[in-house]
Structures are given as C-alpha cells and as structure tokens.
C-alpha cells in the first residue's frame, strides 16, 4: 500500500541548491533510512515530508487521511505545559479516551463519569494501548508527568518528543536523528521496539547498528542522484561498492567512445545527413558521461602531536557529589600512554562531569587529579562550536594562525586545512550560522585537532556527523598515538576504536572493564548455565500451559482473558503511581483523603478483574 510519493522536489536557499528533481515513494511497513553527506539537505527533506516546509518545485502526494508524526532534531514545546499536558495534546482518539479515564480516576466520587470512561476504555480496547503508553514513558525515563517543560534539559525534551511521536500511533513516523540524547540502554530498547512494532518509518540517523537492525531499505542521495537499496546497512555497503565500481567501468567506456567521437567531430563532415545530425546530438551526452567524476574527497586529518611523558593523568581517591547525587566515590586510576578508553552509562550518572573534572573545569570534593607536564588536552564537548555573529568559516580557523604546523616540520595554510575538512573555497566564506548541524560539528572537530593535542577527549563526537565523516574520523582515531577518552552512545563507533571501558553504574560506582562495548554487553548478559537452563525450561513450560488453557476457551473467552491481563497490568501501574504520591510529606489531610479514595477505586477494580480472571483460570483446569 502506497502511503506517500515524492515527485520531482527541489530546494534552494539563495544561490545554494540543496537538491533538485528528487522522486521516491514510501509504502506501508517500509523502514527507510535516508543517507547523505552533511549539507545535502537531509533535514530539509524531512521537514518537507512532515509539512513543516515546502519544496520550491515538485509535490508530495499523500494517501487520504495519512497520519504523520515528526521527530525533529530540536523539538519545541510550550514551556508552560507539563509532560502530561504535552503528551495528551494530540488528536489521537485513544489518547483522548485514556485522558478522560485518567481524569475520572481523579474524581472517584463521580461514579457515573468513571463508569462511562471505563466503558469507553473497554469499547475501544484502550487498555493495551495505555499499558504500552506507560511503558514508553517509563523506558524513556519520563516518570514525573507533572514536570514543567521549562525545567527540562535538552535531552529530556528530545525524549519527550520521541515519546509523543511513538504514543500518537501514526501511520508514518518521520525521525531526524532519533538516537541523539538517548543512553545506550534506551537506544537498544528503541531498536528492539522498532524492529517488532508495525511502524512505517522514514529516518535520518548516523547510528550504523540502528540502521543494520531496524531498516529494511536505504535511500542514498549521492552527487545529486537517489539510489535505493532494498536491505539493511550491510547490504547497502556491499551494493554501493558494486555500484561505484560499475560506474567507473561505464565512465571508462564513455571516455574511449568520447575519443572516437571527438575525432569524427573534428573532421567536420560536410554532408549533414539525418544520421550524422543524430550523432552530433549524441556527442554532448557522451562528453558529459566521459567527464563525470565522483567528488569523493575525504577529510584528511593530520596533526603534529606533542610528545607524551611518562606521567600522564592520575586519579587518587577522587570523590564527587552534587547534594545527594554521588558521581565518584574513591575513584583510583593511572592513565598509561596510548590508552583508548570508552565511557558508557545511563544519562545522569556523571560521564560529562568526569570529563570536566579531568580537564579541571570542575574540582573534585576529595582526592587529587594529577596532570603530567607534557599533557595537552583536546576537548570536544557536546556544546559544539560557539558561533559568533557574522563570523565566517575561514575566520574561525585563522584565530589559530594563518599557518598551521603539521608533522615533520611542514605547515599548511588555514585555507588548505579547511579544504582537507571538505570546506571548499565558496563554503569557507559562508557565515558559520548558515552551516548545517553536521558541518558545524565538522568545523568544531577541525578546531580541536589543529591544536595538536596528545590526549583527546571526545564527548558524543558522532552526533550529527554524516557516515562518510564518521568513517574517516574512526580511521584517524585508530592511528592516533596519544591517549583517547570517548563518551559515546554510538555502539559501532565504540566497538571500532576503544579496547577498554569505564562503566558508570550510578551512585559513584565505576566499573573498569577490559574490552569494547559489544564485549561488555555479552559479559553483562551472561548468566551461569544452570540459571539459563532453568529460565528456559520455565518459559517453555509456561508457553505450553498457556496453549493448553487457550484450547479450553471459546474465542470470546480467550479475548476476554487477554483483555483482563492487560487491564490488570495497567491498573497495577496506576495503583503504584498513586502509592508513590503518598511519600510526599507536604500533602494536606484533604489531599491524603482524596488520594485514598482514588486508590480504593483502583483496588476494587483490580479485585473485581482478578476474580473474573480466576474464574476463567478454573475453567481451564476443569
């Protein structure tokens, strides 16, 4: 079933043409990744698909009634609203039913309104949806639904936008870098969720494991043309390589034909027959094919690293806390020359704080951090480049000098250095604020590396970089002779460049693990063989038991049985949320009474449904 067709769209900003005459289709159950270099217009295409922007020419033809949700890189919400208000600010019929039910729970004395809301939940089978909705919020760590948008961090707002997009249950979900600002655990959950859920997806992401495990189609914009690959990331890489090799063969043939036709053209035949006119017309096309060249210039990273001495960085009994939140507790470590360490852990466990203590921008509460005399840090932060008004790209580099020193006593001009980072002469004189997010990150990376550090600290370096630049950065880091410390949620990146991990587990605990991210996940998931066997036997036994029970039920009873399970789980979550509110010591007696009434209504509902569930269970066994 065709959902949406893009027909010959073009987009320009002033003299800059992002793309022209692009056409493709999105069908039901497609999970498409859109791949292109930074500055090619990926975000503009997503904005056009979502209706947030329009093409200069061409059109988007959509199926009638198609519901689209869009996750942008920088979502905007009303700062005066709460998480709960924002979630329910939707035209989803099921969300409206759940919202009415939640409101009815707040007023247990109005039994008629509660009964009506409850019946609507039953009629529209909203119990399973409510359970899924609560699980999404829980997985994305959005537990305090009364928190105001104005008090949320950028990462929390991105997670809220993702939750809102998932919960709205659209026909088509359009996503711009969905894994940014998610920790590794959340990314793996989202990966599994998308792999199983019946979503139609169109996304831009640099997360190559995500591409591998979620997408069933990749559309690449390469040198102004679209290429479609019906497979995952591995299939795309393999077939792209074959396509480029074939293009080179065809270009070679065109060059040979061009030489032959050029000789014929130079002879200037006098007789202009119909056949010769046709041959002359074809000549321009042959010339174009013979002279076409791929502009696959790669970022060239080359620095003159300062020599590292024997003493690098030492942590001695370092502790740090912010009020009740413990970041480090008696941390000890001595860095060795050439170490390549990755830092992983859930958001909020103190990864960035650790980096800031290492660079002395934050002081530890106790203990000492000793930095060797020869250490020169290069610190790539999440904040990125500080854009100054009216500053041009070339001016950013010239702040470090007209000429930059390279290895073996050589030097390079600021202009030449920018060319190595894929900023051509025209782009060098663009204002920095006009660059795409990925281009700004590439420029920032350039400013960090040209300072010739011997201890590189990279805090989420892969965000917004295109896959081409990522591959080059990885190759550079593999050859980097100094110390490397990386915080990243990009599992592919971490697996490739680090051989050692600091695992921030929270509450000041940091595990020193010898291996990369995949090694750690395998280790973390491992269990004693007997425990695995017992678990497997229990699961098989439960599946057989459920099947036997189901066979003793009528169709309607089976349906009721499944609905009861969903309702009970959902009500249990409501009960738990209410019980947690009693921990608030500032509650008045009236508020406590009101909460008690709400809790009693839910408990009675649970008991009633459990009784029915047990009745059906007894029938299974009769």
Image: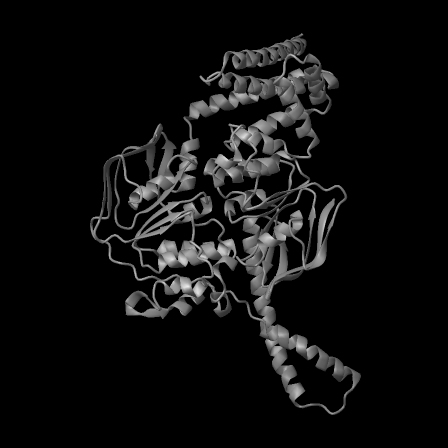
Which residue is at a point 65% across and 8% down the rendered structure image? Answer: 618
Q: Residue 591 location, x and y as percent?
A: 53, 15
Q: Is residue 186 visible?
A: no
Q: Quadrant of the N terminus?
A: top right
Q: Residue 59 location, x and y as percent?
A: 72, 55
Q: How many marks?
A: 0
The quarter of the picture where residue 70 lies is: top right
Camera-nearest residue between 83 and 525: 83
Q: Is residue 387 above or below residue 111?
A: below
Q: Quadrant of the C terminus?
A: top right
Q: Is residue 224 above or below residue 525?
A: below
Q: Is residue 285 above or below residue 589?
A: below
Camera-nearest residue between 33 and 275: 33
Which residue is at a point 58% across and 52% down the rendered structure image? Answer: 43
Q: Is residue 448 above or below residue 547?
A: below
Q: Residue 379 location, x and y as percent?
A: 35, 51
Camera-nearest residue between 262 and 148: 148
Q: Residue furthest right?
A: 274
Does residue 358 appear left or right of residue 14 in this picture? left
The quarter of the picture where residue 555 lies is: top right
Which residue is at a point 63% across and 31% down the rendered structure image? Answer: 88
Q: Residue furthest bottom?
A: 270
Does residue 436 appear left or right of residue 421 in this picture? right
Q: Is residue 525 visible?
A: yes
Does residue 327 appear left or right of residue 313 in this picture? right
Does residue 130 appear left or right of residue 585 in this picture? right
Colour scheme: one colour
Q: Residue 248 location, x and y as percent?
A: 57, 68
Which residue is at a point 46% across and 46% down the rendered structure image? Answer: 492
């Amino acid at each position: 079933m065709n959902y949406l067709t893009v027909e010959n769209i073009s987009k320009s900003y002033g003299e800059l043409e992002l793309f022209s005459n692009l056409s493709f289709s999105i069908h039901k159950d497609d999970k498409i990744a859109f791949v292109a270099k930074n500055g090619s217009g990926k975000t503009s295409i997503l904005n056009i698909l979502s209706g947030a922007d329009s093409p200069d020419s061409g059109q988007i033809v959509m199926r009638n009634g198609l519901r689209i949700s869009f996750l942008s890189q920088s979502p905007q919400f009303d700062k005066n609203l709460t998480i709960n208000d924002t979630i329910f600010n939707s035209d989803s019929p099921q969300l409206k039913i759940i919202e009415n039910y939640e409101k009815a729970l707040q007023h247990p004395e109005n039994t008629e309104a509660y009964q009506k809301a409850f019946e609507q939940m039953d009629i529209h089978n909203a119990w399973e949806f409510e359970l899924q909705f609560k699980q999404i919020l829980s997985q994305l760590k959005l537990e305090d639904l009364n928190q105001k948008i104005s008090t949320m961090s950028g990462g929390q707002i991105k997670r809220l936008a993702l939750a809102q997009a998932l919960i709205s249950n659209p026909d088509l979900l359009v996503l711009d870098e969905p894994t940014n600002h998610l920790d590794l655990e959340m990314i793996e959950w989202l990966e599994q969720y998308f792999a199983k859920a019946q979503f139609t997806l169109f996304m831009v992401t640099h997360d190559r494991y995500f591409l591998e495990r979620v997408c069933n189609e990749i559309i690449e914009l390469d040198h102004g043309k679209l290429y479609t690959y019906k497979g995952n990331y591995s299939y795309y890489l393999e077939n792209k390589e074959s396509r480029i090799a074939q293009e080179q063969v065809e270009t070679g043939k065109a060059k040979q034909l061009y030489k032959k036709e050029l000789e014929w053209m130079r002879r200037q035949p006098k007789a202009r027959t119909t056949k010769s006119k046709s041959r002359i017309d074809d000549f321009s096309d042959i010339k174009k094919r013979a002279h076409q060249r791929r502009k696959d210039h790669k970022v060239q990273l080359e620095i003159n690293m300062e020599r590292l001495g024997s003493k690098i960085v030492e942590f001695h009994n370092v502790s740090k806390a912010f009020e009740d939140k413990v970041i480090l507790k008696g941390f000890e470590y001595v860095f060795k020359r050439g170490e390549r360490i990755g830092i992983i852990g859930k958001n909020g466990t103190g990864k960035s704080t650790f980096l800031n203590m290492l660079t002395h921008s934050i002081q530890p509460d106790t203990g000492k951090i000793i930095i060797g005399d020869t250490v020169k840090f290069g610190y790539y932060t999440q904040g990125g480049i500080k854009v100054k008004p009216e500053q041009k790209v070339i001016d950013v580099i010239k702040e470090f000098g007209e000429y930059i020193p390279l290895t073996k006593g050589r030097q390079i001009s600021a202009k030449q250095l920018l060319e190595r980072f894929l900023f051509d002469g025209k782009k060098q004189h663009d204002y920095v604020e006009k660059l795409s997010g990925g281009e700004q990150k590439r420029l920032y990376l350039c400013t960090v590396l040209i300072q010739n550090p011997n201890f590189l600290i990279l805090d989420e370096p892969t965000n917004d970089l295109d896959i081409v630049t990522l591959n080059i950065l990885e190759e550079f880091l593999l050859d980097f002779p100094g110390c490397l410390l990386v915080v990243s949620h990009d599992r592919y990146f971490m697996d490739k460049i680090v051989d050692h991990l600091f695992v921030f587990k929270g509450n000041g605990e940091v595990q020193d693990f010898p291996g990369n991210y995949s090694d750690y996940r395998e280790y973390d998931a491992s269990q004693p063989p007997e425990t695995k066997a017992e678990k497997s036997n229990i699961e098989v036994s439960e599946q057989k038991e459920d099947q036997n029970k189901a066979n003793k039920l009528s169709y309607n009873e089976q349906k009721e049985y499944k609905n009861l399970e969903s309702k009970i789980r959902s009500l249990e979550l409501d009960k738990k949320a209410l019980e947690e509110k009693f921990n608030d010591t500032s509650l008045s007696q009236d508020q406590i009474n009101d909460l008690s009434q709400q809790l009693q209504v839910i408990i009675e509902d649970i008991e009633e449904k459990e009784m029915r569930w047990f009745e059906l269970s007894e029938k299974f066994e009769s």
